[in-house]
Amino acid sequence: QVQLVESGGGSVQAGGSLRLSCAASGFIVSNYAMTWWRQAPGKPRELVSGIDTDDSTAYRDSVKGRFTISRDDSKNTLYLQMDSLKTEDTAVYHCMGCQVYIAGQYCQTLGLWGEGTQVTVSS
């Protein structure tokens, strides 16, 4: 059974950093493109970043140069290092594997969404 458990969120001041983790079970993360998404209150879920099976990465423009996606195959875990956080980064962050992936554009989701982890950035 595919399961994703996100952690590492919290409350930080603008300019601070957080590192999110996504522990996967039921599948091997290195065999799929993996993505981070976020959803702010009253807004649709948006794709933040993705890492493909060839380790190529993609980011939405608003986080380029500040966020770094990575994967630890030995731990079957996905990460998102978030630096220089801004108030507009406040959201619930989710990870998701993709059965079909087009970098920055499309992800056919693998399994159900986890609970996510809350990131709150204050000014």
Image: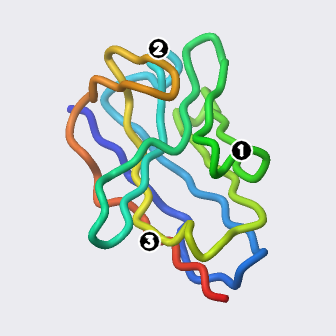
Q: CA distance from mark 2 to mark 3?
A: 27 Å
Q: Which residue is mark 1?
A: 64
Q: Residue at x 44, y 58 (%)?
A: 93
Quarter residue 100 falls in: top left
Q: CA distance from mark 3 to mark 1?
A: 20 Å
The secondary structure type at the circle numbered 1 is loop
Q: Assess whether mark 1 and mark 3 are in contact (beta carbons under 8 angstroms).
A: no
The amino acid type found where label 3 is placed reads Gln
The amino acid type found where label 2 is placed reads Asn
Q: Position of residue 85 (x, y in %)?
A: 70, 68
Q: Assess whether mark 3 and mark 2 are in contact (beta carbons under 8 angstroms).
A: no
Could you classify mark 1 by the number of other residues whose Cα lies within 10 Å: few (under 14), some (14-19), or many (20 or more)?
few
Q: Which residue is mark 2?
A: 31
| Residue 2 falls left or right of residue 24 | left
Q: Position of residue 113 (x, y in %)?
A: 25, 46
Could you classify mark 2 by the number of other residues whose Cα lies within 10 Å: few (under 14), some (14-19), or many (20 or more)?
some
Q: Residue at x 27, y 70 (%)?
A: 42
Quadrant of the image for the C terminus? bottom right
Q: CA distance from mark 1 to mark 2?
A: 25 Å
Is 43 drawn above or below residue 94 in the view shown? below
Q: Which residue is mark 3?
A: 118
